[in-house]
Amino acid sequence: MGTLTSPVDHGRLVLCITEQIVNGLSLWGYRQGMSMDPCFYKIEPFAHLMYASLDNANLRGANLRLANLTDAKLSGADLTGATLRGANLERADLSGANLTDATLKYAHLKDAKLSGAKLSGAKLSFASLENANLTDAKLSRAVLIYADLRGANLERADLRGATLERADLTGADLTGARMPDGTIHD
């Protein structure tokens, strides 16, 4: 992974135009902020990243709205605060990824691998997580209103403080999961 950065200093504010090369994929981004702020990468909505290999990529705050990430490899990626609203992540590998405070409303995560993923504070309302593997996932304070979790594996998942209003958990495995009220599911 290589990074080319061109900061333009305008007094206290810096406009940082950046190209990050991740396994041959060019990600352009910009940020306006204090000169000590790191740059981040903005990927245009509707991006086609099927089968992309983005393991351990820094995609904090990335705009991946409506992106097609079917079968993408994002294991260990940092997607903190990223926008993935309506994105297709079917069969994507997000094992160990950091999705803290990410927006995944209406995202399609059927058969996705999210074991050990950090989804604290993530917005997953109306998301499809059918048959997803969420073993040992951190979902504290996550909003899962109307989420489809049918057949999902939530073994040992941390759901403390999560909102599961009208979520469909039919056939989900909650063995050892810490429920929203703090109790451990049998």
Image (spheres, rainbow, N blue to C red):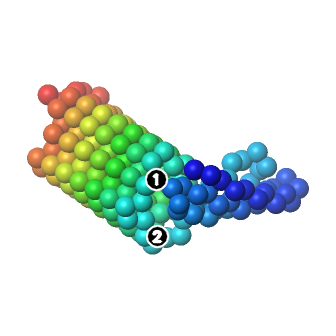
Residue that badge 2 annotates = 47
* Secondary element at image label 1: loop
Residue that badge 1 annotates = 54
Amino acid carrying label 2: it is: Ala
Question: Is 28 displayed left or right of 97 in the figure?
Answer: right
Q: Residue at x 37, y 57 (%)?
A: 72
Q: Residue at x 37, y 48 (%)?
A: 94
Residue furthest out toward the right: 11
Q: Nearer the viewer, mark 2 or mark 1?
A: 1
Circles 2 and 1: CB atoms closer than 8 Å: no
Give whichever of 13, 161 is nearer the camera: 13
Give whichever of 27, 117 is nearer the camera: 27
Image coords of residue 151 (percent x, y): 15, 49
Residue density around tag 1, few if under 14, some if 14–19, many if 20 or more, within 10 Å: many
Q: Residue at x 20, y 28 (%)?
A: 176
Image coords of residue 140 (percent x, y): 37, 37
Q: Residue at x 43, y 55 (%)?
A: 53
Image coords of residue 22 (percent x, y): 54, 55
- Residue 110: which numbered mark, if any? none
Residue 108 occupies quadrant: bottom left
Quadrant of the snapshot with the C terminus? top left
Q: Is residue 76 visible?
A: yes
Question: Is 81 displayed left or right of 141 in the figure?
Answer: right
**Disc nearer the start of the sequence (2/1):** 2
* Secondary element at image label 2: loop
Amino acid carrying label 1: it is: Leu
Q: Is residue 100 visible?
A: no
Q: Is residue 116 above or below residue 148?
A: above
Q: CA distance from mark 2 to mark 1?
A: 14 Å
Give whichever of 161, 175 is nearer the camera: 175
Residue 29 occupies quadrant: bottom right
